[in-house]
Amino acid sequence: MGILKEMLLSKKYLVNIILAVLAIGTMVFYMVCAGSCSYLKGEILGLDLKYVGIIFMAAVIVASIMKKDLALLIFLSAGIGVEMFLVAFQVRNDVYCPFCLSFGAILIIMFVLNMDLRRKWVAILFIALGLASFLLLFQGSVTPTYS
């Protein structure tokens, strides 16, 4: 496991970009989802969460290209807080979206890859801020759509 971790860390920015592109791909598939996830609707400040996810991962790609470790840690930590809220929303409503959960899994991998234990308080602060922002600003529903 140590060799794999070293390899991933040496190529961290490239791995970040590849994972972010995969996450964007999951959001594109989510846009055409006709399964149980079509019941899930969410927005923040009037912007659909699918677009928020794409914008978020685009920012991660830019930070990776620029090799901005602190910005990556801040973005990914806030994202973890948001994902905590969104997964809880799915659990509470007993409706699960495989695309949303895949996006969250990719985010967790990126967070672990970019976590710097010397900056754990930054991570904790931004996890809390991400969670709090969605507690205050998220508007979502679980409404069946009939065709």
Image: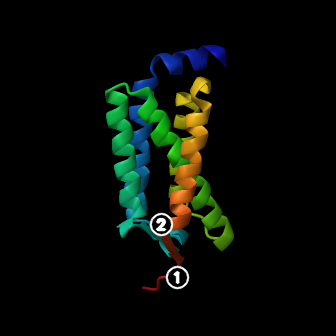
Q: Position of residue 118 (x, y in %)?
A: 60, 23
Please give the label number shown on residue 144: 1
Where residue 131 appears, as percent x and y from the top left, is 57, 55
Q: Is residue 77 visible?
A: yes
Image height check: is 2 above or below 145?
A: above
Looking at the image, is mark 2 or mark 1 earlier in the sequence? 2
Quarter placement of the C terminus: bottom left
On residue 131, which mark appears? none
Amino acid at the residue labelled 2: Leu
Question: Within the image, what quadrant is residue 52 found in?
Answer: bottom left
- Residue 9 higher or lower than 144, as above or below: above
Amino acid on which the number 1 mark rests in the picture = Pro
Q: Is residue 92 left or right of residue 57?
A: right
Callout 2: SS: helix
> What residue does disc 2 label?
137
In front: label 2 or label 1: 2
Q: Quadrant of residue 93?
A: bottom right
In this view, the residue in front, 74 or 59, is: 74
- Please state which of residues 48 and 78 is positioned toward the viewer in this rendering: 78
Position in image of residue 43 (x %, y %): 43, 68
Q: Is residue 4 left or right of residue 46?
A: right
Looking at this view, is 15 or 117 the one in front?
117
* Residue appearing at x 61%, y 32% in the figure: 120
Q: Residue at x 47, y 82 (%)?
A: 145
Residue 3, position as x, y percentages in the image:
61, 13
